[in-house]
Image (cartoon, coloured by chain):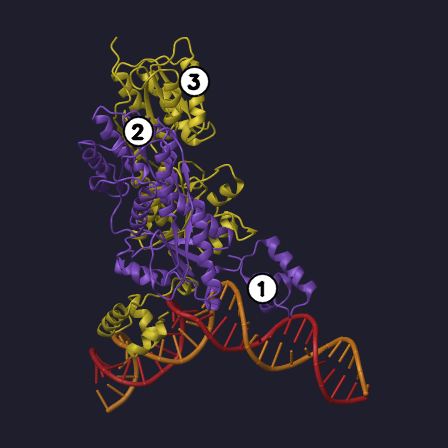
Chain colours: A purple, B yellow, C orange, D red
Amino acid sequence: MVTIKDLSDICGVSVSTVSKALNGQPDVNPETAESIRRIAHDIGYHPNAAARYLKTNRSYNIGVLFADQLKHEYFSLVLDSIREAAQSLGYDITFISNKIGNSEMSFLKHASYRSCDGVVIAQARFEDPQVVELATCDLPTVVIDHVFSECPSIMSENVRSMTEILEYVNRLGHRRIAFIHGEEQSAVTQKRLSGFYKGCMELGIKVPEEYVLGAKYHKPKESGLATRALLSLSEPPTCILYPDDYSYMGGLSEIEKHGLSVPGDISAVGYDGIHLAEMLRPRLTTYRQNVEEIGRKAIDLLIEQIEKPDEKIHTMITVRGSLQIGDSVRRILE
Amino acid sequence: MVTIKDLSDICGVSVSTVSKALNGQPDVNPETAESIRRIAHDIGYHPNAAARYLKTNRSYNIGVLFADQLKHEYFSLVLDSIREAAQSLGYDITFISNKIGNSEMSFLKHASYRSCDGVVIAQARFEDPQVVELATCDLPTVVIDHVFSECPSIMSENVRSMTEILEYVNRLGHRRIAFIHGEEQSAVTQKRLSGFYKGCMELGIKVPEEYVLGAKYHKPKESGLATRALLSLSEPPTCILYPDDYSYMGGLSEIEKHGLSVPGDISAVGYDGIHLAEMLRPRLTTYRQNVEEIGRKAIDLLIEQIEKPDEKIHTMITVRGSLQIGDSVRRILE
DNA sequence: TCCATTTACGAAAACGTTTTCGTACCCTGA
DNA sequence: TCAGGGTACGAAAACGTTTTCGTAAATGGA
């Protein structure tokens, strides 16, 4: 490794002067400083992050908490945009877990062990005490798709997305609309549920109790079961809203099992807007989440906290997605 | 942050003794050591990684190079298994890029700036001089799905996978088999091509030149075009092998555009074995890569280099996947 | 009893930085 | 000429660890 000592030897000045030149301190001759910077650039010197942290208490390293669902495209894309945003601002990212080797270590301990400047809680079991501890600690934190008091959060505009979807399917003539939602205890689900009821109300759509069913996010089997229940109603819905695009796949196969088709017999809408949606035939109509914006806002909010520790930030930012229209909702004639 | 000094105050011994106790040095009274360890555990002390690195030159941090294709499930799953494997062995992982903030920094510089103990080159433009520099430098490195001299590598058994696929479709009666492959310059493609030719030869299958077409990995449009070319041949293939599951989707839509169906008119086989494959109807027959094993072997190989720097390791490990049979290949009667 | 060895601990240096403080030198003004 | 003040630089401490080395006390052997 090339150290500041090596550089100072080459430049013929002390390490103090080199450090000051590179950090733009005023008490160094402009010409000397410029020459030092040039040489540093030429030999490719970069101050070691670990040593620098020790003095400054700033690691320029951000921890991210991603429990285990990276396999879902939505989370992968969020991670990608977090990484992109962080690196463009000079921060690297490291995964935080609650074990290291064979010894247990809370998420918070892990973040401090790695001396993270802050943590993005991107996907986790939000009811886990360790996650709560992390979200409410002194360390700058931001949470995605959930709300904690004392911790800024980024959420999709879940209410609005539902009303937008409803307006669309209503415009195509649907009045019997079912909603299969994800885990009930999730903040996201609650928002979407209220968006669903709000939208239906505004459009004068009556929602039979049996039209609202629970499943789990990203579990095609669960939404398949819910779909089966819907299809066996004496008055089945003409359109089913799914909790996410994967879940639609489970519903679809159940629909086909009944000898029905999308959108001929049943219309369907997904959520998330993953790649898959546009590759399917019929193309799936879905609500595309703005993952780039979600990641970027999360990092913006986190770094604001890191760099201005005095100001208490307590925002909740919502990010608007967009309805991505495919061929999975047909027009119904009265 | 709780430091070793705090801990030593509580224990009533010097920091040296605490350090030695925690690191299992022999010259400390077993009872003292045990008591120190208990107190450390109780107050949740963990030595700060940055400070520790400064003395030991070991960061227990592994850099990973993932260019920009995290959006593809295959790479996400590899990342997930790398992370899992690394953390189970006490290592964290950090993304390596070639810029930090608004200043350029080579991959190698970045890894050294973050004092990584080693780097996994998981997905990159392998011809990029910076990647070559990284792969051939002194820092322990391992590369996935490519071969560099001087750098151990992990690859799927690409040759064997192709022969396995061929045996299967041949068994179902296919003799006119086309192969759409990915980028020609890629090592993976080369292996699969030779596996394809080898398999065909062994089975006595004649391959017209027009049956082997190039596309790009994960580009449905490209494979769609290739599919169109195949369908317009005077004697089109009865079965098409795709470079990956996404590409199959592009081919499928082209097939349907011609009024044909899978597997009724054309049989098809994918590659990778992503989730999507089993959710489609017909379920896609595909070759499932063993992502868990790939990630684990990569980390094993890397950490072996890290912990035994004297032994020159220069292995190439291949990981076997498995044919995942769906409904996209039909039996052909002579 | 006395010396030699072992045992158990602490002081201090070092890792690569940043930052505080001290100081030599050069100006300027009277 | 001399005081006063600015400019430009370096020495050294500090961050939280690990590790080397020194040493006091305890132990063992004759």
Q: Which of marks 3 and 2 is nearer the N terminus?
A: 3
Q: Name the residue under label 3.
A: B228
Please give the name of the residue rendered at 35% of the width and 35% of the height, measured from the top-left corner: A170
Instruction: Say which amino acid is labelled 1.
Output: Asn
Q: Which residue is located at x 38 percent, y 66 percent?
A: A138
Q: Which chain carries label 2?
A: B
| Residue at mark 2 shares a chain with residue at mark 1 | no
Q: Is mark 3 on a helix, strand or loop?
A: helix
Asked if labels 3 and 2 share a chain, the reply is: yes
Q: Which mark is residue B27?
A: none
Q: Identity of the amino acid at label 2? A: Tyr
Q: Mark 1 points at which residue?
A: A23
Mark 1, residues whose alpha carbon is within 10 Å: few (<14), some, or many (≥20)? few
User: What mark, if any, has residue B287 been given in the picture?
Assistant: 2
| Kind of residue at disc 3 | Arg
Q: Is residue B16 left or right of residue B172?
A: right
The percent coordinates of residue A205 (x first, y second) are 29, 39
Give residue B160's quadrant in the image: top left
The residues tagged by marks 3 and 1 sit, at their Cα atoms, a distance apart of 59 Å
Disc 1: which chain? A
Distance (Cα) linking label 2 and label 1 = 53 Å
Secondary structure under the numbered disc 2 in the rendered image: strand
Asked if residue A227 is positioned above or below residue C4 in the image, the reply reads: above
